[in-house]
Image (tube, grey):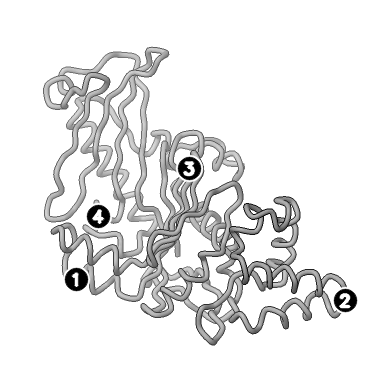
Amino acid sequence: MPDIDTMLLRHAYAHPAPPDVQRDFIFTGERYVFNPPPIKNHALPALTWSVAPNGINYLTARVSVPKMLHGTNTVTVTDSDVTRALNGITDFASGVAGVDFDATTANVGRVDVAHNFQIGEAETYAYLSALRAASMPRMVRRVIDDGTVDFTNGSQKVCVYAKHAETAHLAKQGKATDEDVRRAVGVLRVEHRYLNSGACKRLAERLKLPDRRADTLLRSFVTETVMGETMKDLGLDKAIESGDARLALLRERYGFGTVYQRLAGFLALCDEHGADNLVRLGVISDRTFYRQRREVEAAGAWLVSPIKRTLPPLRLVRNTQAASAFALG
């Protein structure tokens, strides 16, 4: 099932930085920071004491839950793991800063929802190739070499990447073990990052939660909802057909007629000029492009498999013992 990676927790205080913070933290001119090194590759929470423009003081704790508990984010995190991490953050932040910091009641200022799909190296790069044409609502797509496709706006980021390539690079820097590298082989990782307090607040409101406290927001039903919606928006919840099958998909949904003819012509223009270039070149208007793309997406013909076979939909499973979730639809 999907899990939680990086999270940022924040508590407000009516008093200025306590003596422990002033003594042990580094003052940057704007805030006090404490960045402890990892212990045997296990991350410790980074702490920050800051003062908002309204004069309220805040202590924040930021850490990757799997890296804190397991030393790597190639393993799955369960609800009980999150509870254990919150207890550890409570003890660590309270002890280092010299104030009462209850992580379970802290407001969430960032949360990354992630899932590792164990599908094989060749399939990982096939899906990444198909995602070069994907879109996310109100986000800008960016392709980084052949191993990463991400989508960003001011408050969220969706990142899909080859986990083995990233982990191998970290291993060269001494930041990952050989076991981490072996575990990452064949993993396609999908992350949806809510980067600030506003994004976390809107997520809680959309899910009709009473607040964005850690004990409210950092739950498996939230991660499952977020990842399910993300996979649907990316188009990974449906089979991705080869280019030769797209016309058959259009005919199956719209039949022979003017809609089929119009969309077949639209796909031909996309193939000839590149979908991202049609509006820029003035071939069609922005409004027409997005309308026709939605029609093609509805037929399951937008994303294209780079290989001569269908890529099956990726499924989320409720198996806390395995990070794999690869199945035929």
Residue 252 point in image, percent of width and height: 77, 80
Counting residues from the start of the chain, the first of labels 3 and 1 encountered is 1
Q: Are marks 2 and 3 in contact (CB under 8 Å)?
A: no
Which of the two residues, 10 or 144, is positioned nearer the viewer here?
Answer: 144
Query: 10 Å neighbourhood of mark 4: few (<14), some, or many (≥20)?
Result: some
Foreground tag (3 vs 1): 1
Above or below for 230 versus 108? below
Foreground tag (3 vs 4): 4
Above or below for 302 versus 311? above
Counting residues from the start of the chain, the first of labels 2 and 3 encountered is 3
Q: Are marks 3 and 4 in contact (CB under 8 Å)?
A: no
* Callout 1: SS: helix
Residue 329 point in image, percent of width and height: 59, 79
Counting residues from the start of the chain, the first of labels 2 and 1 encountered is 1
Q: Is residue 268 left or right of residue 35?
A: right
Q: Is residue 23 left or right of residue 13?
A: left
Q: Amino acid at mark 3?
A: Thr
Q: Amino acid at mark 4?
A: Leu
Q: Amino acid at mark 2?
A: Gly
Residue 257: give its label. Answer: 2
Query: 10 Å neighbourhood of mark 3: few (<14), some, or many (≥20)?
Result: some
The residue at which mark 1 appears reads as 179
Counting residues from the start of the chain, the first of labels 3 and 4 encountered is 4
Q: Amino acid at mark 1?
A: Glu
Counting residues from the start of the chain, the first of labels 2 and 4 encountered is 4
Q: Residue 87's quadrant in the figure?
A: top left
Q: CA distance from mark 3 to mark 4?
A: 21 Å
Q: CA distance from mark 2 to mark 4?
A: 58 Å
Residue 216: give its label. Answer: 3
Query: 10 Å neighbourhood of mark 2: few (<14), some, or many (≥20)?
Result: few
Q: Are marks 2 and 4 in contact (CB under 8 Å)?
A: no
Foreground tag (2 vs 4): 2
